[in-house]
Image: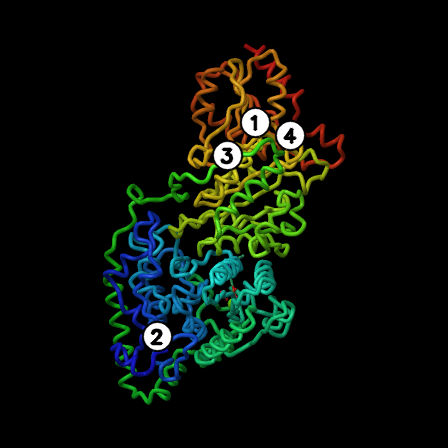
């Protein structure tokens, strides 16, 4: 813990050491902005952020105010400039002003240790970014989306952070970041680190489902995260009377078996000391807490909103309570500081704003021709431990792969619903908890979206999550978290997001519309996800291993019907690179048949009995799909049939056909055909379902027709 003396020695006796990151504009700190190419990533250990006087050491009031006020003033001044720049067209997107919220944002951030504690800030936490290491220059660049912007222009405004320093970048979808904080904090503490989390949410965002999910997971798993609710009485134009019915939002803590407090968010010292106290409490209990800060919003929701729906007397009252002048008065009282001394600080801040802006304004625009934009982190070629086993069923191959991954990767963990003692709904995880322990095979609450967020957060700390969806159908619960947050993570932050997601899928098991879907078509619509769909025991093992070691979010579709009905030997030589390829099962000259999942076996039945010469392929890697070998095959046979289990509009068959038409139209002897289910939900009764699902008989008839046609 530093003393007053330290503060004086640092040469920042007025602004305090907290102000230092904000002062270091230009030069080295700008170079260290996270880059997508990975070359300029910040190494958390070598960051220039000073180990400031933070929890468990507490600042005295003079220390606190002399550190907080200049940063709050800097935040206000910068946002005023950003608003002007927006009106002049220099700032893109919008500006969501923090004015009125600076005391909450500064007080909650001051106790955190950058690079250690995990935090997800929101759109009114500008000062929090400054406090935790973002420089004014970087922030101006970010808002102007220029070539030096923190996200390299790939994302805008407040959607930035510093993953290596554990400041996770917000996404627009409110309520989605806290689960990441829970996952990161959990993963870091599992490694023995003394870490806390801070997850921020507004009164509006507090109504989202995932806030409940995240609080519940944090509470069940005993993860010390502060859920800080910034209650500024409005969600855009919606007053809190239309948002919730309880007295205080913190009252909800009771439902999670945790502590909740509502405090005055306009008093920076009160916020700061409450957070310090909370950290001490959480150190003892390991439980999360809810801290609701009653705060204000002095502008409209964003640059485009006048906020004229706020009654005039309320706005007048809020202006009178403006935390900036209030903190200024406290600074003078606590430090015995004169008016000219405070004015000198403000002048220095103004000068800093001017010089940061003068540096940022001439920075060029990002050049789309030379700008590196990739949605996937590169997969370095690697060789891992080989594995082989005599014949096993496909379902058992899943268990073998999971066992192999847990055995060889101490930071891997398997989690989901009923994967522990029960061994998962299809028993694919049987025995894993006995072999690897409850610390690594975790039964989690029923909340798929927060679980994906949890996995994404954990992955940023070096943990290697393997998540099981009980059924692929429940993946529709995670549209935002997987399809927008995890999938874009590398693009936005330059950091890999290595997640392995297992989706038991498909019909033929008489389980109806909500337990029989495949969903590979849906998930292929989100750039940044990799999709694998194995059909044999060998492929099942390979898909899980490939997906696990890949630095991107990977979804493995496991057809449930094949768990019991199919099997084979597994012989894996350890070379990962060679796994990412399409699979050919038979050679033929009459027709190329491309099949997905369980349809592979229907097609192989046909190939085995038909008098036609049929070449059966499984793309296996559905995204990014390598069409090269399939195109070659079609050029040889001149005919293409695609077979998928799901409805014509729901799968990837049309995409394969479109690609062949684009690239090899001239080689086709007849129009390509698609055998698919009708576009209906999967019907329940066995008679209806077997009529709905494509089968060998239909496939054979279409092949005969295609070969007869020319
Ligand atoms: C899930 C979701 N729905 C809608 C929006 C659009 N939106 C952006 S900010 C906002 C208001 C948020 O209010 P609150 O959580 O109280 O935060 P405040 O802006 O008041 O700080 C809305 C509706 C969003 N970002 N996320
Ligand atoms: Mg609000």
The earlier-in-sequence mark between 1 and 3 is: 1
Q: Nearer the viewer, mark 2 or mark 1?
A: 1
Q: Nearer the viewer, mark 2 or mark 4?
A: 4
> How far apart are the two marked residues, 3 and 2, measured between alpha carbons?
52 Å
Q: Nearer the viewer, residue 147 or 28?
A: 28
Callout 1 touching callout 4 (CB < 8 Å): no
Callout 2 touching callout 1 (CB < 8 Å): no
> How far apart are the two marked residues, 1 and 3, measured between alpha carbons?
11 Å
Residue 531 at x, y percent in the picture? 51, 38
The earlier-in-sequence mark between 1 and 4 is: 1
> How far apart are the two marked residues, 1 and 4, measured between alpha carbons?
13 Å
Q: Residues within 10 Å of mark 1 (few under 14, many from 20)?
A: many
Q: Nearer the viewer, residue 248 or 377?
A: 377
Instruction: Identify the secondary structure beneath mark 3.
Output: strand
> How far apart are the two marked residues, 2 and 4, measured between alpha carbons?
63 Å
Instruction: Identify the secondary structure beneath mark 1.
Output: strand
Q: Nearer the viewer, mark 1 or mark 4?
A: 1
Quarter of the picture containing the C terminus is: top right
Instruction: Identify the secondary structure beneath mark 4.
Output: strand
Residue at the spot of label 3: 622
Q: Nearer the viewer, residue 518 or 602?
A: 602
Quarter of the picture containing the N terminus is: bottom left
The earlier-in-sequence mark between 4 and 3 is: 3
Residue 188 at x, y percent in the picture? 47, 61
Residue at the spot of label 2: 73
The colour mode here is rainbow
Instruction: Identify the secondary structure beneath mark 2.
Output: helix
Q: Quarter of the image holding residue 53?
A: bottom left
Residue at the spot of label 4: 677
């Amino acid at each position: 813990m530093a003393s007053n003396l330290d503060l004086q020695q640092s040469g920042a006796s007025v602004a305090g050491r907290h102000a230092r990151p904000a002062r270091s504009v230009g030069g080295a700190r700008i170079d260290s902005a996270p880059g997508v190419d990975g070359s300029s990533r910040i190494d958390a250990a070598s960051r220039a952020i000073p180990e400031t006087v933070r929890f468990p050491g507490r600042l005295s009031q003079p220390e606190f105010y002399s550190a907080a006020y200049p940063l709050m003033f800097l935040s206000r001044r910068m946002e005023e400039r950003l608003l002007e720049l927006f009106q002049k067209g220099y700032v893109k997107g919008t500006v969501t002003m923090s004015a009125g919220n600076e005391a909450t944002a500064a007080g909650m951030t001051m106790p955190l240790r950058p690079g250690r504690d995990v935090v997800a800030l929101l759109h009114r936490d500008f000062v929090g970014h400054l406090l935790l290491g973002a420089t004014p220059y970087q922030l101006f660049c970010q808002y102007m989306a220029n070539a030096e912007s923190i996200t390299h222009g790939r994302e805008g405004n407040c959607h930035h952070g510093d993953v290596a320093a554990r400041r996770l970048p917000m996404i627009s979808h409110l309520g989605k970041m806290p689960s990441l904080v829970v996952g990161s904090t959990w993963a870091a503490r599992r490694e023995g680190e003394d870490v806390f989390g801070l997850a921020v949410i507004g009164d509006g965002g507090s109504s989202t489902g995932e806030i409940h999910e995240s609080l519940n997971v944090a509470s069940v798993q005993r993860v010390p995260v502060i859920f800080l609710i910034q209650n500024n009485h409005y969600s855009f134009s919606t007053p809190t009377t239309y948002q919730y019915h309880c007295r205080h939002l913190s009252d909800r803590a009771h439902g999670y078996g945790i502590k909740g407090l509502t405090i005055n968010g306009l008093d920076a010292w009160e916020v700061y000391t409450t957070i310090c106290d909370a950290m001490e409490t959480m150190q003892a209990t390991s439980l999360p807490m809810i801290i609701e800060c009653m705060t204000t919003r002095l502008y409209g929701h964003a640059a485009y909103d006048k906020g004229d729906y706020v009654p005039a007397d309320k706005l007048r009252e809020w202006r009178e309570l403006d935390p900036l002048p209030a903190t200024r008065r406290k600074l003078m009282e606590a430090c015995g500081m004169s008016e000219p001394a405070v004015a000198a600080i403000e002048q220095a801040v103004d000068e800093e704003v001017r010089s940061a802006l003068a540096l940022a304004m001439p920075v060029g625009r990002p050049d789309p021709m030379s700008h590196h934009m990739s949605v996937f982190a590169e997969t370095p070629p690697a060789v891992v431990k080989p594995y082989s086993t005599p014949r096993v069923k496909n379902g058992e191959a899943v268990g073998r792969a999971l066992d192999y991954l847990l055995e060889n990767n101490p930071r891997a963990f398997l989690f989901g619903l009923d994967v522990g003692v029960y061994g998962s709904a299809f028993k694919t995880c049987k025995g894993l908890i006995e072999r690897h322990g409850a610390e690594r095979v975790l039964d989690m609450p029923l909340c798929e979206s927060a679980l994906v967020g949890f996995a994404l957060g954990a992955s940023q700390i070096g943990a290697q999550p393997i998540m099981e969806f009980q059924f692929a159908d429940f993946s529709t619960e995670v549209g935002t978290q997987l399809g927008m947050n995890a999938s874009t993570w590398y693009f936005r932050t330059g950091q890999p997001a290595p997640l392995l997601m297992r989706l038991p899928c498909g019909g033929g098991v008489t389980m109806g519309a909500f337990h029989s879907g495949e969903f590979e078509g849906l998930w292929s619509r989100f750039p940044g996800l990799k999709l694998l769909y194995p059909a044999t025991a060998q492929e099942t093992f390979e898909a899980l291993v490939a997906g696990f070691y890949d630095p991107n979010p990977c979804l493995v579709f496991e057809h449930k019907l094949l768990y019991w009905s199919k099997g084979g030997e597994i012989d894996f030589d350890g070379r990962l690179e060679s796994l990412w390829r399409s699979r050919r099962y038979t050679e033929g000259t009459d027709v190329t048949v491309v099949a997905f999942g369980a349809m592979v076996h229907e097609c192989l039945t046909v190939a085995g009995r038909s008098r036609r010469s049929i070449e059966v392929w499984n793309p296996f890697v559905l995204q990014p799909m390598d069409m090269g070998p399939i195109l070659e095959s079609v050029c040889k046979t001149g005919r293409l049939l695609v077979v998928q289990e799901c409805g014509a509009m729901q799968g990837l068959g049309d995409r394969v056909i479109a690609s062949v038409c684009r690239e090899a139209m001239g080689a086709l002897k007849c129009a390509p055909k698609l055998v698919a289910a009708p576009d209906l939900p999967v019907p329940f009764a066995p008679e209806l379902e077997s009529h709905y699902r494509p089968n060998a008989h239909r496939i054979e008839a279409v092949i005969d027709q295609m070969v007869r046609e020319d």
